[in-house]
């Protein structure tokens, strides 16, 4: 069976996260999006973990469902959380975010007990620890043989395993002798699998994509599509073996839209390609401070393969634009406007789910459902016939389906990307 899985979200107990990110609302929005399996998020936080124990019950092997599931009876939850480790290694301060998956309440409790003794797990849904990534991985593996750690948004400049500001140059440098237990990494919104495959040392690593949602409507902006049973252990086996038969594809942001794709300074209005950054020796021409080096540049730095490298061995990726953003451009109003939201709700009610509309329906079906202009826009997104203004230094990029974007920051068609 096809399973669309979003395995990285946050609860309302995380900083800068919507108060609506509770389990019931997440399940309802997962059904709207067409997501079959979703993360609980933040199982390290005592209050959210109490809600997990109170509101969820065991479902299929290692997974959970709402006890009161009348609004989303088919949605399943996987126990997962994100943690931040900030520590010194090799005379440099490292800041690494990691995803953790657990197969049982017992395993999650065991981890929480250790985490609570070593740090503060009450102040934030994504706790900050002062011990190393190696010690974190030890705790995860000790909780249960099938618990798993996956480096989160692996290229984000400030908080990731490969980040330009505080990361490492390899998995081995970060996790040492325990590196064989790292089977997957999350590519993040500002990169996609093709970019990551330029680095041969990641060939055996499974690349996953998730929304990292902080509000319900952002669920599914990236996701994973499996052909397997609804089973925690089977999904972990797919990730461990990079099984291309059962891992059908990832659903991706166009990576330029991610807020750390290019280099630059948001406050100075400076957005550079890696080539432009090299010309100024990495220094902002406006304020003369070092530029924030983005994901594209950092991958260039570590890559041992060319920009146009492709391999048929990789799990495919399908790049999408959220339906509400497509409607916003077609209707000419903001994504939160009454006109756009009303049309979005109509299409979901009549079309089944957002992913059903974006992934599955033929153009003729889309035309009948949404009209010729919206159907054409969805098809253009599928074909990559769009223009993108790159995100940089914490500012999301912008996509135009119908016309080229204007300066001041670089814009190019997706099919002419540097990589």
Image (cartoon, helix red, strand yellow):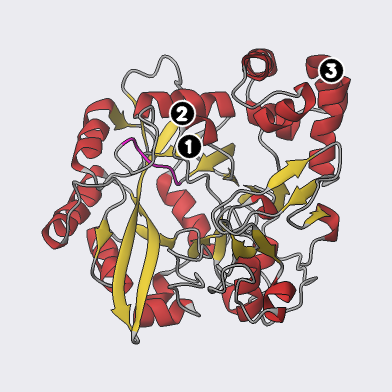
Alpha-carbon distance for marks 1 and 2?
6 Å
- Residue bearing mark 2: 75
For the N terminus, the quadrant is: top right
Q: Is residue 188 left or right of residue 310?
A: left
Chief secondary structure of the magenta span?
A: loop
| Whether residue 90 is situated above or below residue 351 in the rendered picture | below
Q: Which residues are magenta?
A: 8-12
Q: CA distance from mark 3 to mark 1?
A: 31 Å
Q: Quadrant of the C terminus?
A: bottom right
Q: Looking at the image, which residue is at 33% across and 18% down?
A: 68
Q: Is residue 9 magenta?
A: yes
Residue farthest left in this picture: 117
Element at label 2: loop
Q: Residue at x 56, y 63 (%)?
A: 206
Badge 3 local density, few (<14 within 10 Å), some, or many (20+)? few
Picture disc at residue 37: 1
Which of the marked residues, 3 or 1, is nearer the chain's N terminus?
1
Residue 371, which numbered label?
3
Q: In the rendered view, does 62 fall on the left or right side of 335?
A: left
Q: Nearer the viewer, residue 242 or 254?
A: 254
Numbered label tally: 3
């Amino acid at each position: 069976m096809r399973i669309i899985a979003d395995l990285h979200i946050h609860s309302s107990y995380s900083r800068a996260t919507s108060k609506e990110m509770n389990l019931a609302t997440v399940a309802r929005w997962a059904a709207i999006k067409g997501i079959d399996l979703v993360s609980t998020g933040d199982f390290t936080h005592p209050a959210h973990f109490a809600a997990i124990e109170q509101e969820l019950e065991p479902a299929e092997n290692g997974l959970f469902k709402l006890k009161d599931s009348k609004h989303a009876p088919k949605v399943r939850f996987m126990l997962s959380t994100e943690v931040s480790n900030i520590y010194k290694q090799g005379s440099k301060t490292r800041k690494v975010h990691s995803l953790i998956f657990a197969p049982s309440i017992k395993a999650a409790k065991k981890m929480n007990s250790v985490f609570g003794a070593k740090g503060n797990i009450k102040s934030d849904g994504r706790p900050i620890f002062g011990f190393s990534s190696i010690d974190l991985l030890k705790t995860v593996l000790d909780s249960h043989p099938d618990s798993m750690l996956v480096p989160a948004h692996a290229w984000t400049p400030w908080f990731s395993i490969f980040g330009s500001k505080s990361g490492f140059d390899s998995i081995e440098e970060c996790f040492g002798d325990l590196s064989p237990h790292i089977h997957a990494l999350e590519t993040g919104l500002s990169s996609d699998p093709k970019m990551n495959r330029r680095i041969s040392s990641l060939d055996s690593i499974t690349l996953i994509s998730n929304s990292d949602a902080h509000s319900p409507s952002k669920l599914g902006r990236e996701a994973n599509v499996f052909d397997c049973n609804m089973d925690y252990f089977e999904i972990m086996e797919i990730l461990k073996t990079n099984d291309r038969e059962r891992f059908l594809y990832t659903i991706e942001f166009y990576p330029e839209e991610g807020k750390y794709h290019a280099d630059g300074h948001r406050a100075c209005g400076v957005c550079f390609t890696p080539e432009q950054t090299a010309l100024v020796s990495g220094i902002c021409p406006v304020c003369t401070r070092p530029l924030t080096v983005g994901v594209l540049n950092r991958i260039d730095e570590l890559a041992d393969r060319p920009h146009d490298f492709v391999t048929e061995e990789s799990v495919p990726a399908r790049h999408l634009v959220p339906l509400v953003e497509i409607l916003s451009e077609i209707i000419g109003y903001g994504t939160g406007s009454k006109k756009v939201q009303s049309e979005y709700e109509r299409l979901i009610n009549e079309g089944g789910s957002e992913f059903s509309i974006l992934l599955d329906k033929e153009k003729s079906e889309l035309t009948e459902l949404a009209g010729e202009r919206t159907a054409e826009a969805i098809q253009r997104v599928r074909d990559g016939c769009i223009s993108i203004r790159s995100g940089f230094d914490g500012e999301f990029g912008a996509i135009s389906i119908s016309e080229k974007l204007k300066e001041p920051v670089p814009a190019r068609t997706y099919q002419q990307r540097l990589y």
